Amino acid sequence: MSNEITGPWRTSSYSAASNENSCVEVAPAPLATAVRDTKCRERGHFCVPAASWATLVRTLKGARGR
């Protein structure tokens, strides 16, 4: 899986609203989503397969409604 970023980084609106110390940023990469800590960008990022990221987001959105 390639970890080359193909789009801009964006800050998660959910994490920013809940706690300023737990923000993450995400960016598209081929077949994946890149994730990094907003406050420690210099530590790099990791990539999550696109299907796994979609499942995580769907699960979290469902949990908010409970």
Image (cartoon, grey):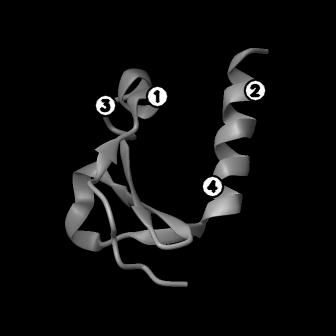
Q: Which residue is mark 3?
A: 20
| Sequence-first tag of 1 and 4 | 1
For marks 2 and 1 on the same chain, the one whose residue lies earlier in the sequence: 1
Of badges 1 and 4, nearer the viewer stands 4
Q: Quadrant location of the N terminus?
A: bottom right
The amino acid pointed to by label 3 is Glu
The residue sitting at 36% across, 78% down in the picture is 4
Checking the image for residue 53, the label placed there is 4
Image-based side of 31 in relation to 20, left or right: right
Q: Earlier in the sequence, mark 2 or mark 3?
A: 3
Q: Secondary structure at mark 3?
A: loop
Q: Amino acid at mark 4?
A: Trp
Instruction: Find out whether the residues at labels 2 and 4 contact each other: C-beta distance under 8 Å.
Output: no
Where is residue 60, by image quadrant? top right
Q: In the figure, is residue 49 to the left or right of 42? A: right
Please name the amino acid that badge 1 sits on.
Tyr
Q: Within 10 angstroms of label 2, few (less than 14), some, or many (20 or more) residues?
A: few
Per the model, the C-alpha gap separating discs 3 and 1 is 10 Å
Q: CB of mark 2 within 8 Å of CB of mark 1?
A: no
For marks 4 and 3, the one nearer the N-term is 3
Q: Please name the residue that numbered disc 1 is placed on.
A: 14
The earlier-in-sequence mark between 3 and 1 is 1
- In three-dimensional space, the C-alpha distance between marks 1 and 4, rounded to whole angstroms, equals 15 Å
Disc 2 versus disc 3: nearer the observer: 2
Name the element at disc 1.
Answer: helix
**Could you say whether the residue bearing mark 2 is in a helix, strand or loop?**
helix
**Callouts 2 and 3 close, C-beta under 8 Å:** no
Label 4 crowd bin: few (<14), some (14–19), many (20+), radius 10 Å? some
Which amino acid, by three-letter code, is at mark 2? Gly
Report the Cα–Cα distance between label 2 and label 1.
13 Å
Q: CA distance from mark 2 to mark 4?
A: 14 Å
Q: Residue furthest top?
A: 66
